[in-house]
Image (cartoon, grey):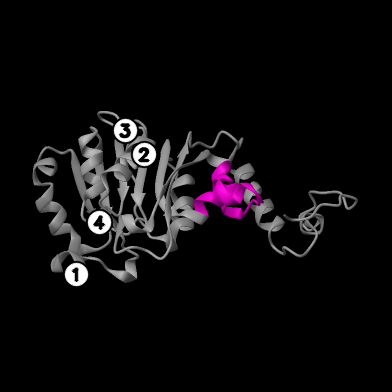
Amino acid sequence: MKEEKMLKKKSLGQHFLHNRHYLEAVANAAEITKGTLVLEIGPGDGALTEVLLAQGAKVTAVEKDRRLLPVLAEKFATEIKNKKLTLVEADALDFEPAFAKGKYAVVGNIPYYITGALLKKYLTAAKQPSTLVFLIQKEVAERITNHGLASKNPKESILSLSVKAYGTPTYVNTVPRGAFVPPPKVDSAILAVHGVSRSNFKNKNQEERFFELVRAGFAQKRKLLKRNLEALRVLPACANLSVP
């Protein structure tokens, strides 16, 4: 137990999940079948990795904390030998997936503080995953999906619009803070984004233009939206719109 506590690094936002019910919910949300290619972000001590492998996935696990690599290497020595698991020491924000063929899923129990950055990186990757499943802060998942309390007063954000531009986000399940070791200060949720693609954009220019408009729309929340868009010369001055 002492060794387990030492392995958790607060600066990396590490909160390990061992509850089998929730781990299987994550894997099920990623629609894992035999042979599915999975990029796992931050395997930690390998609890989710174990479930993914048990469901037949071929996993590439990217771990930033080098102290955990020997633990994972020992735990999954057989799977590594059989090439069912590949361990990579890297920062997931810098790692470039090199899956040459077939679809793949991105799955992870990720640190809250890099949620937006990870969503942006993998939803906009040159080689996009077909599915993305993250354990994130409950409130953020609710805002992205208009679930729970957010459904009573739905408001879009740059993050929620960005996610919806690339796929269909779903609030899968709430994961209480007590399910983690050590427990975070807030509850988490399983967010799944299915059907990830660029089908909403005709080309790269249109994709870039979309985000330019979104950023302009949210640039000054107290200002009329039409004024922000007028600066980009995309909306007639007579429109009377406001940012939610």
Q: Nearer the viewer, mark 1 or mark 3?
A: 1
Secondary-structure class at tag 4: loop
Separation of marks 2 and 3 at Cα, in angstroms: 8 Å
Label 4 CA crowd tier, 10 Å (few <14, some 14–19, many 20+): many
In the depicted view, which residue is nearer to us: 149 or 146? 149
Q: Provide residue 120's location: percent of width, then percent of height.
A: 49, 52
Q: Provide residue 81's location: percent of width, then percent of height.
A: 9, 41
Q: Is residue 129 above or below residue 177?
A: above
Q: Main secondary structure of the magenta part?
A: helix
Mark 4 and mark 2 residues within 8 Å of each other at the beta carbon: no
- Magenta segment, which residues? 140-164
Residue name at image x 35 percent, y 55 percent: 92
Q: Is residue 160 magenta?
A: yes
Choose top left, top right, bottom left or bottom right for residue 226: bottom right
Secondary-structure class at tag 2: strand
Residue type, mark 3 in image: Ile
Query: Which residue matches tag 2?
Result: 105
Separation of marks 1 and 3 at Cα, in angstroms: 32 Å
Residue name at image x 38 percent, y 60 percent: 111
Query: Which residue matches tag 3?
Result: 32
Secondary-structure class at tag 1: helix
Separation of marks 4 and 2 at Cα, in angstroms: 18 Å
- Give the quadrant of the C terminus: bottom right
Query: Which residue matches tag 4?
Result: 44
Q: Is residue 9 above or below residue 84?
A: below
* 61 left or right of 187 in image: left
Label 1 CA crowd tier, 10 Å (few <14, some 14–19, many 20+): few
In the depicted view, which residue is nearer to us: 198 or 49? 49
Query: Which residue matches tag 1?
Result: 6
Mark 2 and mark 3 residues within 8 Å of each other at the beta carbon: yes
Residue name at image x 26 percent, y 44 percent: 20
